[in-house]
């Protein structure tokens, strides 16, 4: 019995020793991972590398958008600035400006007065909102036209909403310039979080409505399945990206560790912009790559 007890004690000691060793290895790995994260964040070389990678990715998306714009123009030259053309043009501009900002990210951080830094980093985000709000408008027009409901008020509403967003943001910039306190920075970021949530709900509302309407079409309807997939995928992608932006803006406003407007958070910048702008834009451009037919295009009317 005594021998059995000793064996059990030795076995327990071995298990405890093994557990302690495993815990030590895990702790060491976590420490090394933390050190790696800190080393990359604090290294000017890695900061520039990551920002330049973002610039290249944005430039690729911008080139894809302008190529698609040219293809559409060559396909239907008789139409003016249709919703589809404006959408691709805005994608070209937004991603092109983002590419330039990240190429000169270090220089932008040194701009004075500081309000210029906020303007340079925020304007592409506002333009991104306008770009995808245009897609919501397009879907809303299709939905109401299919239900024989007047769409006269949709475009004025689109321009009014965008005007309000830009006027409020400009007012916040002016106040931040006049009185550069942290509270105004927080208010500005929370305002953009609200704008992003509004955009996410817009996609959920009109993308969801259009999806459900298409589901009720006869199964044999031409292009029904493809259009269902297109609307479903784009709605999911855009709703998710604007929701992530909203959540991240809330963290950015109150947590210095989540600050996106500084040079020493390059990894966070890379993950954030990849998830909320680069990937969504790339996927949406791919999904909407189909060219319009040459004739009889009722939905591609000119923007007034």
Image (tube, grey):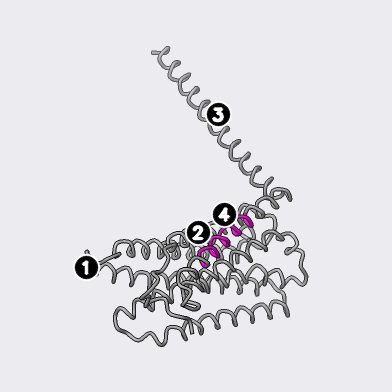
10 Å neighbourhood of mark 2: few (<14), some, or many (≥20)?
A: some
Direction from residue 234 to residue 46 in the image, left or right: right
Give the Cα separation between the discs numbered 3 and 1. Answer: 64 Å
What segment carries the magenta color? 54-69
Name the residue rendered at 42%, 87% in the picture.
Answer: 153
Q: Determine the secondary structure under disc 1.
A: loop
Whole-percent x and y of residue 180?
A: 72, 75
Instruction: Identify the mark nearer the N-term, 4 or 2.
Output: 4
Question: Which residue carries the number 2 mark?
Answer: 282
Question: Residue drawn 55% across and 29% down?
Answer: 21
Residue 206 to residue 276: above or below: below
Residue matched to label 4: 271
Percent from the top left, x then y, of residue 56?
A: 62, 55
Look at the image and tell me whether residue 285 can be seen. yes
Question: Considering only order in the chain, which callout, 2 or 1, is on the residue closer to the N terminus?
Answer: 1
Q: CA distance from mark 2 to mark 3?
A: 46 Å
Q: Quick one: label 3 or label 4, which is nearer the N terminus?
A: 3
4 vs 1, front mark:
1
Q: Are marks 4 and 1 in contact (CB under 8 Å)?
A: no
């Amino acid at each position: 019995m005594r021998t059995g007890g000793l064996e059990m004690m030795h076995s327990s000691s071995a298990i405890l020793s093994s557990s302690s060793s495993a815990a030590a290895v895990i702790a060491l790995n976590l420490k090394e991972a933390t050190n790696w994260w800190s080393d990359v964040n604090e290294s000017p070389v890695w900061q520039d590398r990551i920002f330049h990678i973002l610039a290249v990715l944005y430039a690729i998306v911008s080139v894809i958008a302008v190529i698609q714009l040219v293809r559409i123009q060559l396909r239907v030259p008789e139409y003016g600035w249709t919703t589809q053309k404006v959408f691709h043009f805005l994608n070209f501009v937004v991603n092109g400006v983002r590419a330039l900002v990240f190429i000169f990210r270090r220089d932008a951080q040194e701009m004075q007065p500081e309000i210029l830094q906020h303007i340079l980093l925020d304007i592409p985000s506002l333009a991104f909102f306008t770009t995808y709000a245009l897609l919501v408008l397009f879907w809303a027009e299709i939905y109401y036209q299919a239900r024989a409901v007047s769409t006269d008020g949709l475009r004025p509403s689109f321009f009014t909403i965008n005007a309000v967003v830009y006027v409020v943001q400009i007012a916040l910039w002016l106040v931040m310039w006049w009185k550069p306190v942290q509270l105004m920075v927080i208010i500005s970021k929370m305002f953009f979080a609200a704008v992003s949530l509004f955009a996410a709900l817009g996609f959920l509302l009109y993308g969801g409505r259009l999806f459900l309407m298409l589901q009720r079409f006869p199964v044999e309807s031409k292009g029904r399945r493809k259009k269902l997939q297109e609307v479903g995928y784009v709605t999911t992608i855009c709703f998710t990206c604007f929701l992530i932006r909203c959540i991240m803006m809330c963290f950015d406003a109150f947590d210095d560790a989540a600050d996106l407007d500084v040079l020493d958070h390059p990894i966070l910048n890379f993950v954030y912009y990849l998830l909320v702008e680069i990937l969504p834009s790339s996927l949406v451009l791919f999904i909407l790559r189909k060219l319009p037919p040459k004739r009889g295009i009722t939905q591609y009317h000119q923007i007034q």
